Image (cartoon, rainbow, N blue to C red):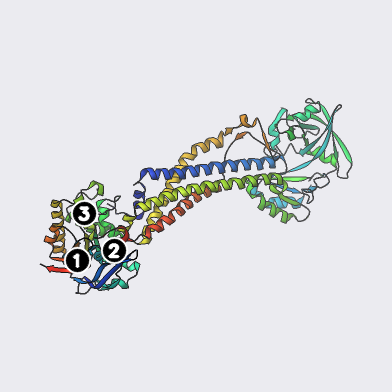
Amino acid sequence: MNGPNVTTLAWRNLWRNRRRTLLTMGSIVFGVFLAVVFTAMQDRNWKDMIDLAARLGGGHVSLQHPEYLDTPTLTRTVVRGEAVETALDGEARHIAHAVDRVIGPTMLATAGENFSAAFIAFDPEAEDETTLSILEALDQGSALEPGDRDGVILGHRLASNLGMELGDKVVYTLTDKNGEIVSGLARLRGTLKTNAPTVDGGFCLLPIGTVRELLGYGADEATLVAVFLKDQRRSGGIAGRLDQELGETVAALPWNTSQPQLAAFIALKVGGAVVMEILIAVLVAAGIFNTLFVSVMERLREFGIMLAIGWSPGRLFRLVMMESAWLAVLGLVGAFLITIGPYLYLSSAGLDLTAVYGGTVEVAGVGLDPVLKIGIFPRNAVLICLFAVVATLASGIYPAWRAGRVQPVDTIKVV
Amino acid sequence: MGDGPVIALQDVTKVYRQGSVDIHALRGLSMEVEPGEFTAVCGPSGSGKTTMLNLIGALDAATSGSIVLEGQELGSLNKKELSELRRDRIGFVFQAYNLMPVLTAYENAEMVLWVQGVDAATRRERVMGLLEQVGLKGLEDRRPSELSGGQQQRVAIARAIASNPAVVLADEPTANVDSETAETLLGLMEELNREQGVTFLFSTHDPQVMERARRVVRLVDGNIASDQRR
């Protein structure tokens, strides 16, 4: 037979009013569930957007000519020489891939039509869908094979506008390093279909080797080196270190600097989401406070007795705080049990919003999958749990303090 | 602890302010309670019984005068010291039992010892012995809701004397039980008084208690009208 202690006493007190405890638990569970799902939605959404944007252009960190950001011309290049390789080696444990790209505008012409487009010249040997997400949207034909020197892949609408079929020829015109107009001939190997108008109607992929020769670039020269990180959240720190190491000749820019439009969009959304999460937290905390306060006020006489027989106000404070702590623990366990199923489903199968959006959604120039999936960063999950515990404990502070302030003589009558 | 009285009240007054009116609950009351006494305090409503026991129980402070418990002047103690004094030297038995509903009979009885920091083995030995003494052997695991009124009051008595207090202050301990149970409870308290020397101070309207008490103090208008020892 073991005697009571504050922990077991608090536990038993919690179940004196089962319905109230379950309702309070429910509000914690609901709050944590909402917070986890919303945060997971955002984390996954932003991560996907950032990764997609990175895979469409400059990577999570972009090494480029210091003036390329302001004036992105084909004359502002970066050489992936020894200095760049050494700097990249220094961050090797964070880097998944680093690939060279030439990005710029071009004019495409067939016998009957000509259209302007944006191009990315890449190395088919070094890259696939992992680093160049647009390849996932290959609609007809095939991707550029390693060693293919005269292939081109066009957005399907651009190809249609140019009146091209697979295997047809197209002339692309560029401005080289010296400002001279140069042209190359390519055959259509495949088309892309993303439902994003800017891609489908005005984008093409070219082999980097041929483009380098046309532009008069060296074998290790490009408009940028796209660096892909294992965790995009480190882009700021890694870009800063690379930038410092590479000096004035090469700028290392994180994705949010090289893609300010996307960064602004995400910052705006994150700000709104934080406000909503704070509102949820305040509502949940108010519910918990109300429960604990009412439960304390109902037991004033009992607290008076406990103080009379020698309980200290501090011990009473600990008792009520322990009740809060139990609520937090129960709430978190309940939240885990309630959240895990929907979370696993939404993170693997996702929610197909095609019927709502009618295909790929383009946000800030980035095409998004209409299947909504969620995925929370572990750090955020821990933060939500910590916040739930802190909010529950904080809600208990005043009721606990109030319990210790009871005057026994006011709540009980000895005679 | 000296050989003097357990409780000594000297010229104690207590004035409550109710709106703009001063209520004189005690008017210069003086009295001593010797160790081992079995005293009943009686008197009509408003005579000051409640106030007197509140003051002796260190639950309230006197307006003037001196209250000394085992040589300690209560007015000189701070809140923490008063709390420790209640815990260690005063036992309370309340009219409505006032047991913790979520604790078993055993846990209720051992609560004061637990708060005192007594180790589990000592607590167990003491409390099991006490519960047997008050006739609750075998009912240790029952919660208050599973006990009769008389049984609950026995647990309250066990709780009150578990820490060997200097005095047990009992608030109408027989008011909520039938006369047969009251008789049994009084017999139990008498036995504890006689065999263990526990000092009891009752407030009561119950003639049964007054008959059993060896000293009856009658209060009228905040002062002692009569004080009879038998």
Look at discs 2 and 3 and give the one toward the viewer: 3
Residue A378 in view: no
Per the image, the residue denoted by label 3 is B153
Distance between the alpha carbons at the discs numbered 1 and 3 = 29 Å
Tell me if A248 is positioned left or right of A28 in this view. right
Task: Residue type at mark 2: give it.
Answer: Arg
Residue at 15 percent across and 68 percent down: it is B226
Query: Which subunit holds the residue at mark 3?
Result: B
Per the image, the residue denoted by label 2 is B87
Query: Which subunit holds the residue at mark 2?
Result: B
Residue at 34 percent across and 67 percent down: it is B79
Per the image, the residue denoted by label 1 is B220
Secondary structure of the residue carrying tag 3 is helix
Residue A239 position within the rendered picture, expressed as x and y whole percent measured from the top left? 69, 51
Distance between the alpha carbons at the discs numbered 2 and 3 = 19 Å
Task: Establish whether labels 1 and 2 are both on one chain.
Answer: yes
- Look at the image and tell me in which quarter the N terminus of chain B lies: bottom left
Furthest residue in direction front, as rendered: B20
Query: Which subunit holds the residue at mark 1?
Result: B
